[in-house]
Amino acid sequence: MGSKLVGAATGRIYIRPSFLLGMQFPLEDALSGKLSSDSIAQMEKRYKECDGVAEQEPLWGAQNSMQCYVSVQVTHDKSVADCVEALVGTYLMHGGILGAIKILEWMKIIPEKDNLASLLTRRMTTVLSKNTVPLTEIDFLLNYSRQDVEEILNYKFKDPSLLLEALSHPSYIRNRLTSSYERLEFLGDALLDFLITSHIFEQCQDFKPGDITDLRSALVNNVTFAAYVVKLGLQKYLCSQLNPVLGGAIMAFVEHQEQRNHEIVEDILYLIEEEECQVAEYVEVPKTLSDLFESLVGAIYLDSGGDLCAVWRVVYRIMHREIHAFARRIPRQPVAVLSEMVYACPQFGNATLSKTERSKVMVPVTFTKDGRQHTVYGVGSNKMQAKRAASKLALKVLGC
C-alpha cells in the first residue's frame, strides 16, 4: 500500500514507499500512527524539491522487489493455516460446535447455503425407517449376531440397519439392502479423531504441543483400532466373503494379540499397516479391522441422532485404559526410535510420488545392519506419514 501525500497540487497522490526513505519522523508519529503537521510539511518540502514530480505508485500494486518488503511481514503458509485452525478451535471452545460452524461459514470454508448446523441433527433415512424391509431380514443378513454385538459395545441400536451397514465388508454381496461399511468408516474416523483430541486437550493441559500430537498419534491410528477389534472379538461378526490372503492376515494378527494377552502397549505401534507398505508380505495389521472399529463408531453416531456424548461413552469404555496409560508415558514415535539407533546410521531420502498410487507419497530410508546397507520404502498420504511408515519398516528389518 503506498503512502498518501496530502497538500500536493492534486490534493492526494499515491507514491511509492521508496519516496519516504531517509526521512525521519518523531516517535509520537510512529506511536499514534498519524503524521504531525511538521512531518507533513517535511514531505511536502521533498515533493517540491522534486519539482512536484514524485515517482507515483500504480494502483495495481508493487513494482519492485524492495517495495514488496516495505510494511510487509513474510510468513509461511503453514503459519497462516495454523492461525486459521486456532481461530476455529477458539470458537469451538467458547461457542461449541455451532460456534465453530459459524466461523467456518464466515471464512467461506464451508458454504453458508449448505446449512451444516441442520445437517448435524437431521436423522438419516435408512431401509428400516422407510419400512421397506422387515427386521427379520436384517437379522438374517447379520447372521443373528445383533444382540452379541450390542452387548460387546454396551449400546442398543434403534435402527439395526445401521449396524448391518457397519459390519458389511465390500465383499459381502449377500447384503443388497445397505452399502458396505466404507462411508461409515470415513465418518467414524473423523469422530474418533475429534473426540480423542478434545479429551486430550481438556485433560492434558500441561502437555507441550509435541506431546499432545504424539499422544493423539498413539491413540488414533489403524493399529490401535485393530487391536481393540480383536480384543473385543468383533472380527467374528464381520459380514464378508473374504479372500484367503486377507482372512489369513486377520487370523495372524488375532494370534499375535492372543499371545500378548491383548495388551495394547508401545511396541504394538511399530507393526506395519496395510497402507504403509507396497509389499503385501510385510503387512501385519489388515486395515479391514480398523475400518470395522471406525464404522461401528459412525453407526452409533447416526443411530443416536448425532449424540456425541453417547458415542464417547462407548469409545471411552473401550479405550480408557490406554488413554490413561499412554498419557502417563507417551509412546515414542517410530521416527524418533530409529533416529536414536546411531549404529544403524539411518538416512531418509527425498519424498516422491508413489509409482503404484499417485495419490500416495513414498519416502526411502537407508540404514546399516550387520555391515550391509538396506533400503526400505514407506508409503503414506503425506511426507510425514510416509517417513513414519519407512521407520516402522526399518525397525522391522532391524529386529525391533
Image (cartoon, grey):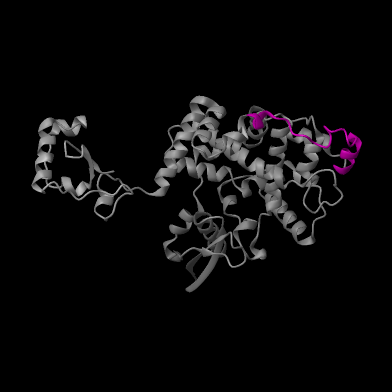
> Left of 391 or right of it: where is 148?
right
Image vertical order of residue 34 relative to residue 80, above or below: above
> Left of 124 or right of it: where is 12?
left
> Left of 348 or right of it: where is 126?
right
Inspect the magenta stretch and tell me whether residue 351 lies in it.
Answer: no
Give the percent coordinates (x, y) of residue 257: 68, 49
Inspect the magenta stretch and tell me whether residue 129 lies in it.
Answer: yes
Tell me the quadrant of the picture where the C terminus can be found.
Answer: bottom right
Q: Which residue is farthest top?
A: 94
Q: Residue at the location (66% across, 32% down)?
A: 119
Q: Residue at the location (10% across, 48% down)?
A: 51
Span colored in magenta: 118-142
Q: Residue at the location (69% across, 47% down)?
A: 291
Q: Residue at the location (77% across, 47% down)?
A: 180
Q: Taking the image as drawn, is residue 328 in sight?
A: yes
Tell me the quadrant of the picture where the N terminus can be found.
Answer: top left
> Left of 332 or right of it: where is 29?
left
Give the percent coordinates (x, y) of residue 56: 22, 48
Q: Nearer the viewer, residue 264 or 240?
A: 240
